[in-house]
Image (tube, rainbow, N blue to C red):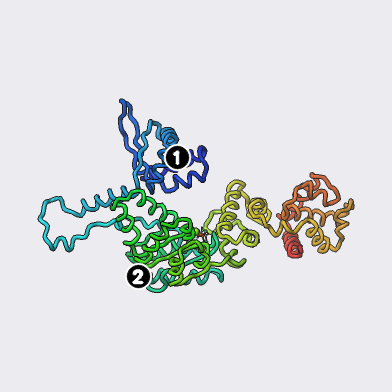
Amino acid sequence: MEENNLIWQNFIGLLKNRISTVSINSWFKYCKIYKIEDAVENNKSIKIVTISTSSLFIKEALIKRYLETIEELMESILGKSCNIEFILEDEINNIKKDEIKEQEAPPQERTQTSFDLAVEKPPTYQQTIESNLIDKYSFDNFIVGESNRLAHTAALSVAEQPGKLYNPFFIHGKSGLGKTHLMHAIGNYIKSTTNKKVLYVTSDKFISDFTSINMNKNSNYIQLFKDKYRGIDVLMIDDIQCLEKAEKTQQEFFHTFNSLYDMNKQIIISSDRSPDDLKLLEERLRTRFSWGLTVNIYPPDIELKKRIVKNKMSGHAVASLVEDDVIEYIASNSENDVRHIEGAVTRLYAYAAMMGPHKIDLEFANEALRDYLKNSVYMDSNIAKIQKAVADYYKITVEDLKSKKRTANINYPRQVAIYLCRTYTDESFPKIGLEFGNRDHSTIIHACDKIKEDLENNAQLKEIIREIKNNIG
Ligand code: ADP
Ligand code: MG
């Protein structure tokens, strides 16, 4: 199994060189290798690779558009000619169902009594259904602040008493604020504390499952769909706004909702908008969404952002090298989107892994993240502001800094100012040189090196720089 996953990842890696990411996400995202078998064809040994797909629609598209590419890439990975076959996830589940039946039913013949019929429950699809939960999202690693406190508290209550308190539970907020994280946290909590059946799906997955029934109008498919979505205790549908584009699926979702709701099963929905703002959803759905509790996750404030940065940094080998002002720097310059904050930490650490610094200070962070943190407040503090703050601190004038004077009382502040410009603005060496009396490139580099070196041994200078920075208007 594990090996098949590796082969599949390898395959997707190669595929990225052939087709666009959008196409990969549209057609290959939910596919997996179901099995790989050896076979002989025309006296040659070959491999038969069976790929599972979530819907007939996708299967047909893969065959029509990508069959040759898949064959070719699989051949390059497995080193043999490959025949590619497809299997629908629903078919796999049917196979599993039969296997369970076989295990449960003793092989010997026996006459069935009416008592048998009454107690013998046929195994259902639910027994093999996957929850689709991602383990790493838990309440433990969800950092709480003012902006998400209500959502967090309500989510925890739902997790503790599914189906009892708030039904449906509707979470909305902008992208990257933790909706999906909270949903999985609820699901994981319920799974670890009860034996309730939990199902997490994105709206797109719900749509594709529903579309495959429409393509396979046989009752078996319809039953499977119903078993999957109505035979569970907790249904979580992520990004419900995607249903706006799928009218038929909305109707089906309405029935699914009613059926679960009537049985007091917990329904959890997320969206990038409030129910009222889902204008293209049927009115009757919007009304139902407001029956339970609706909570909004707001963008994090700076305090929460700092705690999130700290949390995301912790636990890595280089975490102890990070200086405090780096946390502040990332928190105040990243967007209000936790995904963006995580991206900053990932980049910083990737850069650290490459460079092997002995500390991760502001300068290092700025170097690593200057393209990523676009709205850097430091970058807003342009050269003129830095010159003013430095001149004020050393009680000289900005003209002195730009002049040809080379006396120590002016030269050193000038070097400090140049260093600050280089570290906290996005300006190039030539531009900085220009602003300091048209000095050349090498003078600028020399000034930066000099101050960097002094900073290593001179705690007082560190303090001075901190103070000047605070005064940069
Ligand atoms: P959404 O579904 O709202 O777009 P996600 O739940 O996918 O956002 O969150 C994006 C990323 O940010 C995830 O990796 C998630 O773990 C992380 N994240 C969001 N909010 C928090 C938080 N309060 N504490 C820790 N991590 C968070
Ligand atoms: Mg999400």
Mark 2 and mark 1 lie on one chain; the one further toward the N terminus is 1
The quarter of the rendered structure image containing the C terminus is bottom right
CB under 8 Å between discs 2 and 1:
no
Residue type beneath disc 1: Phe
Residue type beneath disc 2: Asn
Q: At 39% from the left edge and 42% from the top edge, which residue is drawn?
A: 60
Q: Residue 386 location in percent, x, y? A: 78, 59
Camera sees residue 48: yes
Q: At 33% from the left edge and 49% from the top edge, which residue is drawn?
A: 216
Q: Nearer the viewer, residue 42 or 219?
A: 219
Say which quarter of the image contains residue 33. Answer: top left
User: In this rendering, would 422 be left or right of 52?
Assistant: right
State the residue lying farthest toward the left: 111
Q: Which residue in the structure is indicated by mark 2?
A: 264
The quarter of the rendered structure image containing the N terminus is top left
Q: Is residue 94 above or below residue 19?
A: below
Q: Which residue in the structure is indicated by mark 1?
A: 11
Label 1 near ligand 1 (CB < 8 Å): no
Marks 2, 1: nearer the viewer: 2
Q: Residue 166 location in percent, x, y? A: 42, 72
Q: Nearer the viewer, residue 300 or 429?
A: 300
Q: Is residue 445 above or below residue 345?
A: above
> Dot 1, how many residues are within 10 Å of its Cα: few (below 14), some (14-19), or many (20+)?
some
Q: Residue 335 location in percent, x, y? A: 61, 59
Q: Nearer the viewer, residue 113 or 326?
A: 113
* Label 2 secondary element: loop
